[in-house]
Amino acid sequence: MHKQIYVKGINGDLPKKSLEADKLKKEIIDIIGTEKIFEDYYGNKGQYFEHVNFTSKRILSEKDSLIGLMIESARKTVEKSMLKTQEIDVILCAYGGTPMFSGWLYSAIIANELGVNNVRTRDFSGSCASVFFAIEYAMLLLKKTNIRHVLIVAGDNLSNYLTKYNISKYKNIPTYGDGVGSFILSLDGVNSSFQLTKLEIMQNTKFANLFVSERFKETSDRFEKEINSVACSSNMKAFVTEDPQNVCKIADKLVEKTDDTHDLIIITGNTASSRLKLLKESYQIFDTYNKFGHVGTADVILNLHMYNVDKAYPRKIIVIGWGVGYVWGGFSLLRL
């Protein structure tokens, strides 16, 4: 029997502390040590930030922590879903960098804070596309096992990447901020916002083996063994080089010929990129880069939440993101 997968409890959270572009420029000059290098790199008055339409980002204060923000978002998601915490079967966490708590899983910490008993947990860490691997894994669990509700929490603390070395390597590093997003994938359509209809993941051939080995090598024996063999081959479509058109290829695979483009929106990861320029020629695009910067793998769920703050969801949403030229991912949602 074909199982339908639903999305419920969509939530996004940001730190309260804001860092505006003007203050950020001064911080960059302090880090690199000279105003001349800043001007050579970002323009006489930092025109680069105006060019990419960046005005501010949110960052964690000394009193905050990424795991604290993730726990709070998880709580809100469960409340919105109208599920009881004990009904959650699996908690998956996705982040782009290395967790602060060496030897600990963020997902296990969240499970403990929520007071969920006998829940299965797993973390995914591998670029800003980690959330797509978590979604893929959740879909496989829901379709192939007796699991019914999977809580996915994505978060990143990318403001920590603002260093002299990273600035010299990646021009847009200063626009990286902090934030989280979460939702539940479920077999129960009650109190659900969307039906999840399709997922696509594309990978750079140079890094494909890395992602295959890292994604599923620590799968618990409690999950059915067949998940491994299915997961490692699913959605694997390789591309030799980084190509802005890969994002368009993801969109083309997720947009159906029968879709009404006037009732469809593409929600993307927050990044000023040539990738988006190509998409904007054909589709309506929504992101929050100008307000919050790029918040890593949390982007796509955070923006899915933010879209609904000011306006009603259209009939269909395509969510697309990518990770440093290694991976491109997306999924399609139908409003219920």
Image (cartoon, rainbow, N blue to C red):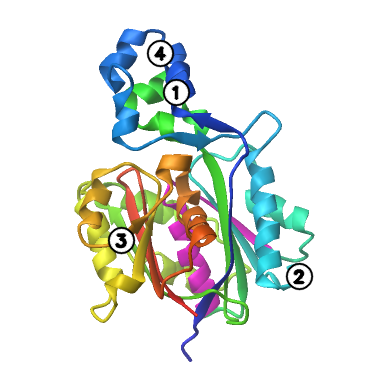
- Residue under circle 4? 32
In the rendered structure, which disc, 4 or 3, sits on the residue that comes first in sequence? 4
Q: Nearer the viewer, mark 3 or mark 2?
A: 3
In the rendered structure, which disc, 2 or 4, sits on the residue that comes first in sequence? 4
Q: CA distance from mark 1 to mark 2?
A: 47 Å
Residue sitting nearer the eye, 105 or 52: 52
Q: Secondary structure at mark 4?
A: helix
Q: Residue visible at 46% across and 24% down?
A: 24
Label 4: how many Cα within 10 Å (few below 14, some 14–19, many 20+)? some
Residue 276: x, y in percent?
27, 50
Tell me the kind of residue under disc 1.
Asp
Residue 53, which numbered label? none
In the rendered structure, which disc, 3 or 2, sits on the residue that comes first in sequence? 2
Q: Residue visible at 49% across and 72% down?
A: 139
Q: Could you tell me if the residues under marks 4 and 3 are in contact, i.e. CB atoms within 8 Å? A: no
Q: Secondary structure at mark 3?
A: loop
- Please provide the residue range marked out in magenta: 120-143
- Residue under circle 3? 284
In the rendered structure, which disc, 4 or 1, sits on the residue that comes first in sequence? 1
Residue 22, which numbered label? 1
Label 3: how many Cα within 10 Å (few below 14, some 14–19, many 20+)? some
Tell me the kind of residue under disc 2.
Gln
Q: Is residue 127 visible?
A: no
Residue 86, which numbered label? 2
Label 2: how many Cα within 10 Å (few below 14, some 14–19, many 20+)? few
Left of 4 or right of it: where is 77?
right
